[in-house]
Amino acid sequence: MRALTNLHYAAHKIEHDRFLTEVSDVVANFGEESMDGLARRVRDWIVSHITTFDRQLLTHGL
């Protein structure tokens, strides 16, 4: 994306980094959230991300 000078790269990268931090925090404190809860959170993020941020790529092009 960066190599193609995508206008949405910065926001897209921030969203990925935010999610990685969130998952890292859950893993670091594992036991406070069940595996099912973590799987649900990951699934929900992926669906939401694809239907918002990734859709921008399709709508606005690379």
Image: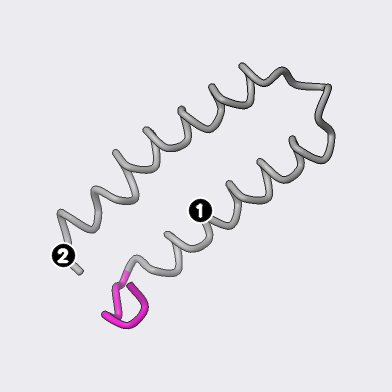
Label 2: which secondary element: loop
Q: Which residue is drawn at the image coordinates 30% and 80% (left, top)? A: 5
Q: Position of residue 16 (x, y in %)?
A: 51, 54
Q: Position of residue 17 (x, y in %)?
A: 58, 57
What residue would you read off at disc 2? Answer: 61
Determine whether 18 is above or below 62 in the image: above
Work out which quarter of the rendered image holds the C terminus and state it. Answer: bottom left
Is 4 left or right of 47, judged from the image as shown? left
| Number of other residues with Cα within 10 Å of mark 1, as a class: few under 14, some 14 to 19, many 20 or more | some
Residue closest to the eye, 61 or 32: 32
Is 32 left or right of 49, judged from the image as shown? right
Q: Which residue is drawn at the image coordinates 32% and 72% (left, top)? A: 1
Determine whether 58 is above or below 27 in the image: below
Q: Which residue is drawn at the image coordinates 82% and 40% (left, top)? A: 28
Residue closest to the eye, 14 or 25: 25
Q: Residue furthest front?
A: 35
Is 28 left or right of 22, judged from the image as shown? right
Is 25 left or right of 10, judged from the image as shown? right
What residue would you read off at disc 1? Answer: 15
Along the polypeptide, which appears first: circle 2 or circle 1? 1
Determine whether 46 is above or below 2 in the image: above
Type of amino acid under label 1: Glu
Q: Quadrant of residue 26?
A: top right
The secondary structure that dominates the magenta segment is: loop
Type of amino acid under label 2: Gly
Q: Quadrant of residue 25?
A: top right
Label 1: which secondary element: helix
Q: Position of residue 56 (x, y in %)?
A: 25, 54
Residue closest to the eye, 11 or 29: 29
| Number of other residues with Cα within 10 Å of mark 2, as a class: few under 14, some 14 to 19, many 20 or more | few
The magenta segment: 1-7
Determine whether 55 is above or below 47 in the image: below
